[in-house]
Amino acid sequence: MKVCCRIFILFSLACCLLACTQQTKVTTPASADTYFPINIGDATAHLQLALTPTEQQLGLMHRSSLDTDHGMLFLFPKTKQAEFWMRNTLIKLDIGYFDASGKLLEIRSLYPHDETPVVSYSRKVLIAVEMNQGWFAKNKVRPGAHINLDQLNEALTQRDKQLSNYPIKPAN
């Protein structure tokens, strides 16, 4: 009987030690405030995703600065001729307009508090990316570069969205 008690006690202690050493990974769901690393051409941008109309209307308003290599990605439910303005936006930005294949079509400059719409030349815009002014030039990201759709898909998944809900057409 004593041997069985000792074995039971040792087994119980071993289980307790095992339970104490195992760590549970606690993750919080990604939100509109989360930055995701997404490559554009050979450069990595850290982007917040503006997916809902409310997130897109707020955009980068009321921010006094934006960290290096940080910006915001706007993903629309369908392709369109996009237009952006800078109401309540305090920093100089560049915006890249991308088509459904993730190809950068054009880059335009945006200026603080300018409420004149900056309209894309193309009517095939599905994605727009706002970065600090000069980011695209500094990183040699030019029209024709592609945004990494796999990384965008991963970011969407973390926001409980799916790339398949958007009219994305990856280049073959």
Image (tube, rainbow, N blue to C red):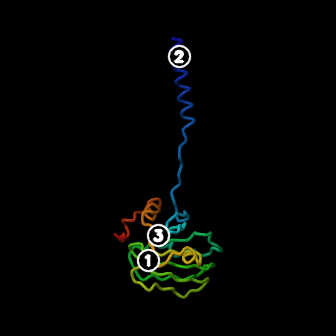
Given the current orientation, which residue lies at the most extreme top position?
1
In the image, taking residue 111 as reference, residue 118 lies left or right, namely: left
First in sequence, mark 3 or 1: give its number: 3
Q: Quadrant of the C terminus?
A: bottom left
- Amino acid carrying mark 1 in the image: Gly
> The residue tagged with tag 1: helix, strand or loop?
loop
In the image, taking residue 130 as reference, residue 164 lies left or right, namely: left
Dividing the picture into quarters, in which one does residue 170 lie?
bottom left
Q: Is residue 76 visible?
A: yes
Mark 1, residue position: 144
> The residue tagged with tag 3: helix, strand or loop?
loop
- Give the class, few, some or many, for how many residues have Cα within 10 Å of label 1's Cα (few <14, many ≥20): few
- Give the class, few, some or many, for how many residues have Cα within 10 Å of label 3's Cα (few <14, many ≥20): some
Instruction: Locate residue 17, reporting x and y percent.
Output: 57, 31
Mark 2, residue position: 5
In the image, taking residue 157 as reference, residue 19 lies left or right, namely: right
- Amino acid carrying mark 2 in the image: Cys
Mark 3, residue position: 51
> The residue tagged with tag 2: helix, strand or loop?
helix
Are dots 3 and 1 in contact, CB under 8 Å? no
Instruction: Locate residue 25, reporting x and y percent.
Output: 53, 46
Q: Judge by depth and name the residue closer to the eye, 58 or 154.
A: 154
Q: Residue at x 62, y 75 (%)?
A: 62
Q: Judge by depth and name the residue closer to the eye, 164 or 45.
A: 45
Against 35, residue 3 (above or below) is: above
Separation of marks 2 and 1 at Cα, in angstroms: 73 Å
Mark closer to the observer (3, 1): 1
First in sequence, mark 3 or 2: give its number: 2
- Amino acid carrying mark 3 in the image: Leu
